[in-house]
Structure formats: C-alpha cells, structure tokens
Image (cartoon, coloured by chain):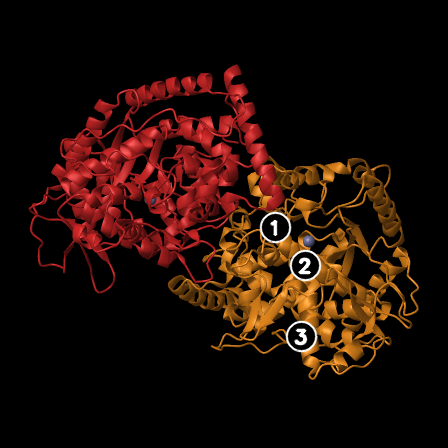
Chain colours: A red, B orange
Amino acid sequence: MLGHDLLLSDAEELLNQHLMEVKQAELNRSYATLDFPPARNFIAVKDKIEASGVFKILEDMPKGAALHLHDVLLTSVKWVVQEISYWPDLYMCQDSEGHLFMKFMDTPDSSCAWQLVSELRAGYKDPKDFDRELHANLSLITENPDGLVTLLAESPDPSDINTVWTAFERGLIGISGMVMYRPAWESYLYRALEEFAKDSVLYLEFRGVLPPIYELNGTELSPIQSVGIYRDTTQRFVADNPNRFFGARYIYAPNRRQSEDTVWGYVDLMKQLKAEYPDFVAGFDLVGQEDLGYPLNNFLEPLLSLSSGNTSIPVFYHAGETAWMGMSTDENLIDALLLNASRIGHGYAITKHPRAKALAREKDVPIEVCPISNQVLKLVDDLRNHPAAGLMAEGFPVVVSCDGLSAWGATGLSHDFYEAFMALGGAKADLRFLKQLALNSIKYSSLDANATSQLRDMWQEKWDDWVTSFDLSPRLTLASSSTLATPTSATVPSTPAATGEVEANII
Amino acid sequence: MLGHDLLLSDAEELLNQHLMEVKQAELNRSYATLDFPPARNFIAVKDKIEASGVFKILEDMPKGAALHLHDVLLTSVKWVVQEISYWPDLYMCQDSEGHLFMKFMDTPDSSCAWQLVSELRAGYKDPKDFDRELHANLSLITENPDGLVTLLAESPDPSDINTVWTAFERGLIGISGMVMYRPAWESYLYRALEEFAKDSVLYLEFRGVLPPIYELNGTELSPIQSVGIYRDTTQRFVADNPNRFFGARYIYAPNRRQSEDTVWGYVDLMKQLKAEYPDFVAGFDLVGQEDLGYPLNNFLEPLLSLSSGNTSIPVFYHAGETAWMGMSTDENLIDALLLNASRIGHGYAITKHPRAKALAREKDVPIEVCPISNQVLKLVDDLRNHPAAGLMAEGFPVVVSCDGLSAWGATGLSHDFYEAFMALGGAKADLRFLKQLALNSIKYSSLDANATSQLRDMWQEKWDDWVTSFDLSPRLTLASSSTLATPTSATVPSTPAATGEVEANII
Ligand SMILES: [Zn+2]
Ligand SMILES: [Zn+2]
C-alpha cells in the first residue's frame, strides 16, 4: 500500500490517530447509510465533502505539487465571473450553435454580434442573475430552484461522455476568450497560484494549448511572448509569496485532433519554447478527448524528433483516459511509454494492460490520477471502482491531481486528495498514504535534482510545522491558516470583488 | 490475456474470423453511438443483448460448466409463473410487511390469511394481468406501460445496494415457498437443467441454503431426504439426456448472518451430507449480502473443523463481494484463501488486495466472476470498470458464472459470457478467450480427476461439432440446435404451459 514503509514520528502518530478517528467515524456512517460521497458525482456532493472533518484536515495539510492541470481551468469560475467579467470593455456574443464567445476590445470587431457585458448585466433587475447564468455557461456546474444540482449527477436524461465533453469544451471557449486578454490572463494566473497556495500546494505544472494572448486593440502576442507572460506572472507571485509558494512550470499541450503537418508545427514551436525558457517550460503533451482524437502513433515522426539529435524534451502524454479496452485510446498507453513519457496523464486503462503496467513500474513512470475528473467526465461513477485503488494497494507509482478542476468547482488538491483517501485508499489508508502522495508529487515533478531537493525541503518544513502545530483538541472546524494575498499587478483594475474571499459554494 | 496460449485449428480460425467481424462491427457501432449494452443495467438492455450477433453465436457455443448458482434462482421465473403457479392447491398470502408467501397445501394452515391462487387469478379479467404481477413480485424485473423497464436501471430514485438486496431476498421467499413443494421442486430443478442444457452448458454446481422440502399434507423432508431428491432429479435428467448433459453437484451454503452455534450445526449437517452423498455433494459455503452478514473469521472454529481429522470437505466461500475496501467483507478474501477455499465466490475486491491476489494465483484458486450479478446488485454500473477486466488481461484464474440469474431474467451462461467477452475482454478478446473460459469452467469444477476428464471429453466433442458445423455464410440469426425436452417425471401435472418454449422476453 502506498506509504506502507514510511515511519511516522511521535507527533505524526498522534495526528494520525486523530485523523483515523475522524475518518473511521465518517466511513462508519457511510457504511451504515450507504451515503458515501465518493460514490456520487462530485458536483452533487461537493458541499457534503466540504463539510467532512477529513476534508478540513486535508485542506491544511501541505500536499506538495499539482502536476496535472490545464491553463484555462485553473482558477475558480466564481472569481472569473465576479472579477474579470466586471472589467470594462468586455463583450460577449453567442453564435447560431449556442457557443458563447467573450472578448475584451476597445472597438468591437465584425466577427460576431458583440454586446457589452456591462450593458447586458445592467439589463437584469438583479446583476446576480446575470452572473449566475454566466457562471453556468462557463462551467459544468448549474443550479435549479431547489439548490445546487447538476447537468450530470444521477439524472434520468442521458448525459454520456460526449455530451459532457461538449459542455466542457463549450465552457472553455468562453473562459479562454475572456482570460486571454493580457491583463486578465496576468490576473487569472496570479489568482490560480493564490488559490493553490491557499490550499497548501507549493508547486504546479500546468498544461496549455497556448491560445494567443491579445491586447485591447486586438494585437496578438506571439507564442514566445505569451509564454513569457506566464513565466513573468509566476515569478511575480513567487516574489510576492516567497515563503508560501515554490513556483510553476508549463507543459505545452496542443490539441491531438490534428494532421501530422500541424503536429510538426507544434513540435517546432515546442523546441523554440524550450530553448527560450528552459527553466519554465517543462515539456510536451497532446490533449483533447482521447477517444475522439488521434492516437499518438499517428504522429510518431514528429514526436520522435522531440528527443533526437541533441534535444531531449520531456513528454507527459495523456494516455488511456478511457473505459474502452483494446481500442486506440488505451493502446496509447503503450506508445506513451515507448516514447519515454516522464509521466502518463490519467493512465486510467493501465490495469487492463499488464505489460504496460510492468513497464511503467520498471521505468518508475507514474500515472497522474485525477479522480474527480474521471468521475465528472464519465469514466466511472463510484470512485471505489476506480482502477487506481488497486494500483495504490500495490504501491504502483502514482500522483494525484485535479485536471480541469474549475469546471466542476474544486479548488486546489484537497477535493481530489479527499476522494483518493476515502475511496481509493480504503478504510486502512492513513497519514502515511497521504504523506506518500505528497512525496510522490515532488519526486515525480519535472524539476531537476537540485530544484526537487529545494522543493522537498520547503515542503518538509511546512509539513513539520503542520504536524507540530496541529490542534488535536476535539473540534468540528479548523481555522484557516492563511489569508488571501491581494494581487499586486499594476494592470488589475479595481472591482467590487477584487479582494473577495474564496468561498466554498458557487454563486 | 486469458486464452493467449491456445492454438486454434484451421476450422476454429475461420469461425474466429467470423466471430471477430461480428464483434468488431458491434463494438464500432457502440463506440460511435456510446450505446454499449454492458455499460447499462442488464435488466434495461436484455433485449438489445439478445439481438446481438455475438450473443447468438455464444448461445450455441459449448460453454462447459456453470459453477456459481443458487438453488431457487436457477429457473426462469416466467416458467415458474406459467407452469408451477397453475398447479392446483397453491395458496398465497401477504404479511403486513408486504412479504409474499406461497405454499402448496391440501388444507390451508392458520399461519397466514391464505387464498387460493387459482381463485385470485380467476378474479382478474385477464389472467395474464395476475401472472404479470406475480412475475414482478418474484423477480427484480418489472415493466411499465411503455415496455420493459426496471426498478433499478438509471432511475432518479435511489436504488442502492441494500434496496436491491431487499427486493432480491423478498423474491426468494415467494419462489422458495412455491418450489419447495416436492413435486414442484422436482419439476423446477429438472427444468433448470433443461434450460442450461439448451444454453449449451453441460454441468452445474449449485449452492443452496437447503430449505425443507414439503409434501401437500405439510410433512417436511429431512435435509438428507431433501438432498436425495436433488440428486435423484439430477440423475433422472442425465438419464433422459445422456448426450446433452453431464450432471450437477450441490454446495451446501446456508446464511452467514448466524451465531457461531448455528454455524456449528451447519457444519455437522455438512459432514452428514458429504458422508451420505459423496459424489453429489461438493462442499460448503456461506451466503447472504456479505456487507450485512458476518465475516468468515466469526466462525473460524466450526469452519476449521471442516478439514480436521480425516474429513476434508472442500469449501467455496463467497468473499469480497463488495465495493468497500479495508472493511470486513473484502478482508474475507484473505480468510477464504487461508481456509483453503477451492474457489472464491465473486472475489470482486481482490484487485485491492495484492497479497491475496498473489496467494490465489500461487494456489491456482479461481474467482467466480458473475458480471451481471455484480451490476444488478449495484457493485458496478459500467462493466468495463469491473475489476475482472484487468485480472483476465493478466491471465488470472477465473471462471464466469451467472449467480442468481433468474432474478434478472438471464438464462444459462450466454448473457454473462456476452458481458465478459464484450466488456471484460475488450476489443481484442477472441475465440481463444471464450474457449479458455469454457476450459477453466471444467478445470476448476469440484469433480475428481476422472470425472473432470470425462466432462472435458464430452465438452471437446461438442466443441468440435460446433466448430465444424458452424455455418459461416452471412446471416443474422442462428437456428437453435436443440429443442426442449419434456419433463418425464410422473409427478408433474399437465398444465397449459407445461410444454411451452423458453422465450426470450418476460411475460
Ligand atoms: Zn488533462
Ligand atoms: Zn452467489
């Protein structure tokens, strides 16, 4: 079992006893009532999870690194709506197919029937109603008059994997258009780092398709310039929070549903990015719903060129994110390993491929397990049936991450750690399991040995602080140990919500 | 992968090509439409499965043995309603909690407000309406005016595991009371063997709680006498069908929710049964919803006595039939193995216990995988997520069986073989996978070496016949190769439905 060989200190043992008492009580209740949150769609049980004592402990626990994330799904949609959508010069437009486009412009162009968001909002009796609608369009979360429900949870309507992906990608278009405005992006990324820091995460590696960043007058930045903004914003946040946050790196991950020629273009750009920002750019991946995209072996020549000659660019392929077996998606796992992936994104299907599993273990290539993503995106309903439960019981290399977390209203790693701890680890998984997940997230980062060791030291110090300062007296809630830092970018306009707290519930 | 080392003959290769064309076409359609029957509750998609070309091939394929079955869930409920419930002297009664009791009596006793079934039925304008209601009460299948729907399938109402088990056990009470009438039981068991023979199954091992068999005047047979009737009925069917059927054995499997004293009583009876019918009685098990019953380690002394001194009674424990991890139910797996189980019933949780898994493999102890049962009884919705998919990919010892098949309207092994072939084996599983499942079912039977070899010879002959006579010309349906034999028991009264064909749909 993951973490079985860790030896806990006396202080850790005490904390562990408390943690396991809380966990056992919650499991016993679920066992008796059959009301077990990980068995139900996260969107429907988010409030229940956040009321859990285990969850509250996890929120404060130093969790290390989040290694599987996506650029425009990093930051809570609630904040985007309350903050970015209140900025001036934001237009929106819906095309005939219902796609929502959003864009900052000094003068609206003629590509769509643009309307000012501020004017649209002013047309509502209560601006909150507009904000609610916008929120629903930008995420997979929705509500009905009875409270929070969902498009997805146990609904009698078909909500199959393709429908969910369509809604998911529709939300991405709206968010992307809005946050790719340069000042919005600076603010969005800064806020993402803040939300992760607040959740006791020290370091991120996020993937992105690299949509062009634009200025108010429509000028588009080059890819090299855009990644420069990513890096500068990250450095600014680290400089503002030297004791709270270690840093972030970027994985260039364009869409896989492309021709080989286009992928050659991606690979060339990848090489330029790596040459320009060797410390900030970690490597390469391909993204998009895997079952409907093209498998890695469509692109062998360009992909092989990533590690030919004297270049050697690390790769972190999404592979095996599917419930199908023996189709191109799960067989991607084998190609990802043969292409020397440093980590596998999801690897959901790996238990059905014992040779790939053995190879990953032999090469110590972890799978990036994203429990909530797999559930919301319809691979598995009851997380107790997630194949990673067996893998973790075998001590297979894994990291737990949160994928497109803002789409389903998670913040940080705590929600996914909760699911892993309660459903994938089972009743016996204890503090050692959690500590090993944190250690794995550092060990399997793309950082070089020196930086990895610095990150581990920083995490260890925070871990020790957390263990020694942990209040073992009985209580129902834990006081938050950090407060939100205010963005310091000069480009962030002041808005009603700019200094608002992160709240647990959606608007 | 299960069957990977089998070498197919030329004739088998031809059949395999045809089989894989049909399978690939069905998978491609499902992949494109996302309408994949194994991903949905069996009760809701039974008709779709029966329309599948793959299913039609499987129906005729000699499948070997069904090793995980239960006494009063063997025979189609439709036949019970159309045949047994039309016999004279059958009474029914509902208690204040809605339990349905049924009993044959010459004079109704005073234990309940008994009413004659024939009179109740006569009170309906259309007797079919009565039969429909009775059918719904005796199985988990129900229908609404729009056609076949289900209590269970994607319903907005909670239909959790306990609710399903309650409905399941409620149906058992009604069936049991009716078929434990001696002539009814003789007819019921004979019919079960007929239904399996018709599905190209040669041999059964069925578990039972051994409810008392009774006569019309209320006399109850002793357990020894009752098992004698099981054996005699089996021998009669084999004598009537020497070229179609090999035989059956019985596993005494009383309920696990009992005191240790009661289990001592079970164990004593077990020893008597084994001494009386050494050839017919295979061994011992404990049954009932595992999460709500008691774990094996509550009963270590009586269970150990099964193999103490000069007795050595094989055991076939249900263990790990749960989605929970680290609770007593999945940890039963370890005790079942340490108690030298010959096979494990379900073993659903075994992938979460690598040491138990390694031990089972080392000792060559198979798990009895019952895909439809696990789905209908709420362990897993989408059978692609069934843990046996990974186990079969590793060549782990498994047999596929059908558990309480009549409760969900399956007949024989074909439905479960279909699910295993399409969902657990994935796109690449071919005739070798199916042949290995058949071979495993023979290899892991409780028969001694000599009988096993006779059964294998009989199966091999039927397999070779099937392969050589298989019509490879394009077609949509296969003609059935066998017709229903009529029961020859002198005690079976003649009824309107006595010679009715087995039909695919419920009434
Ligand atoms: Zn992803
Ligand atoms: Zn069973």
Helix, strand or loop under label 3: helix
Chain letter behind tag 1: B
Of marks 3 and 1, the one in the foreground: 3
Chain letter for the residue marked with disc 2 in the picture? B
Q: Indicate which quadrant contains ligand 1.
A: top left
Q: CA distance from mark 3 to mark 1?
A: 37 Å
Position in image of residue A259 (x %, y %): 21, 55
Whether residue A48 sits left or right of residue B453 in the image: it is left
Label 2 within 8 A of ligand 2 by Cβ: no
Residue A480: percent from left, percent from top? 39, 27
Assess whether mark 1 and mark 3 are in contact (beta carbons under 8 angstroms): no
- Whether discs 3 and 2 lie on one chain: the answer is yes
Q: Is mark 1 within 8 Å of ligand 2?
A: no
Q: Residues within 10 Å of mark 2 (few under 14, many from 20)?
A: some
Compare residues B92 and A88 and report the one nearer the observer. A88
Alpha carbons under labels 3 and 2: distance apart: 17 Å
Give the camera-side residue of B431 and A162: A162
Q: Nearer the viewer, residue A357 or B388?
A: B388
Q: Are marks 3 and 2 in contact (CB under 8 Å)?
A: no
Residue B134 visible within the image: yes
Of the image marks 3 and 2, the number of the one nearer the N terminus: 3
Is disc 1 surrounded by few (<14), some (14 to 19) or many (20+) residues within 10 Å? many
Q: Are marks 2 and 1 in contact (CB under 8 Å)?
A: no
The three-letter amino acid code for the residue at tag 2 is Phe
Residue A288 sits above or below residue A229 on the image: below
Residue assigned mark 1? B398
Question: What residue is disc 2 on?
Answer: B168
Q: Secondary structure at mark 2?
A: helix
Residue at point 20% right, 36% down? A187
- Is residue B66 in view from this perspective? no
Q: Quadrant of residue B104?
A: bottom right
Kind of residue indicated by mark 1: Val
